[in-house]
Amino acid sequence: MFLLPHCLSLCQDDVPTKLVAKAVPLPMTVRGHWFLSPRTEYTVAVQTASKQSDGNYAVSEWSEIIEFHTADYSTVHLTQLLEKAEGIAGRMLRFSVFYRNQQKDYFNKTRYTQDSRMLPAVKDNSGSHGSPISGKLEGIYFSCNTEFNTGKPPQDSPYGRYRFEIQAEALFNTKTNLYFGDFYCMYTAYHYVILVLAPEGSPGDLFCKGRLPALDISDNRFLTCTQEEEGGRLVFHHAQDVILEVIYTDPVDLALGSVEEIQGHQLSSMSTINAKKDPSCKTCNISVGR
């Protein structure tokens, strides 16, 4: 008698993938494993085949169907991603402001319907398929990368011609916790690191504790806040060789910064909104799956 396992994987794009293991003689314990993707629904059924005296096989009916759902990345998986990201982060560059680009309508709506407060929204599905923050964590996206030759934010943006700038210390200081959220690419040479800035004790901070690896704000490879010995002024640095996407988990008042129109182009092709991670990239993938 033989065991014929059969598995249908209902993946993110609802494309069934047939996984069939090699038939093995029974009675015996079936050993082996399949690499299952995180955050994915699976349906599994089993058939047995018994060899008859005439050499043909009698195949049983399918067993009862078992359905299960794989979990998000654990902190172990995220730590593996973190270590991969650290390997390509590059040297640290100084910066002084966080910025957020949007269309003019976004800032008008913020002023007139939200009492001039940018409000956290649920994170989209960009990045790793198993990310525990996608579709769950609420926050506001900010950038902090600068041009190495000017030390200032780039003039181009994928997200809109209007930019809100805020001094770094308003969002990132000794009362803020920093978490590693994800590491991914979009079939290009650019790699992205998602970080979460959460005011200590805030709902966002409570969400991240136990789900995401915490980073030392003064000593990590991506984003640091240190204090000068003389005067106690805060100094900020970001990694040069990855694009940082910083999610701040509390509302932000427009009065804390300024909104100006940028002079560069809107590079829509660089947008990461709901971007799918390249599953074939050896730099930013781990063996557990996407």
Image (cartoon, rainbow, N blue to C red):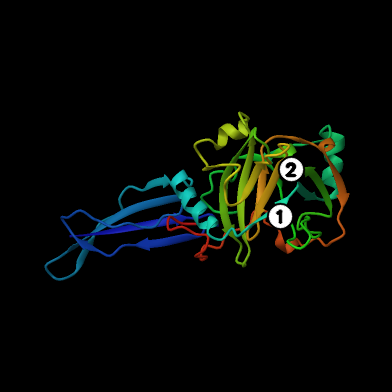
Measured as percent of width and height from the top left, residue 22 is found at 28, 65
Q: Is residue 236 left or right of residue 8?
A: right
Tell me the SS state at disc 2.
Answer: helix
Measured as percent of width and height from the top left, residue 151 is found at 76, 57
Label 2 amino acid? Ala
Measured as percent of width and height from the top left, residue 184 is found at 57, 57
Mark 2 / mark 1, whichever is N-terminal: 1
What is the quadrant of residue 277 in the picture?
bottom right
**Is 204 situated above or below 268?**
above
Q: CA distance from mark 2 to mark 1?
A: 12 Å
The extreme left residue here reads: 53
* Foreground of the two, 162 or 65: 162
Label 1 amino acid? Asn
The extreme top residue here reads: 201
Measured as percent of width and height from the top left, residue 231 is found at 73, 37
Q: Residue at x 61, y 40 (%)?
A: 137
**Residue 264 is at least partly visible in this image:** yes
Label of residue 30 in the image: none
* Foreground of the two, 107 or 10: 107
* Foreground of the two, 219 or 245: 219
**Residue 39 is at least partly visible in this image:** no
Q: Is residue 191 left or right of residue 20?
A: right
Tell me the SS state at disc 1.
Answer: loop
What is the quadrant of residue 2 in the picture?
bottom left
Q: Residue at x 71, y 36 (%)?
A: 232
- Packing grade of label 2 (10 A; few <14, some 14-19, many >=20) is some
Q: Residue at x 41, y 45 (%)?
A: 68
Label of residue 168 in the image: 2
Residue at mark 1: 145
- Packing grade of label 1 (10 A; few <14, some 14-19, many >=20) is many
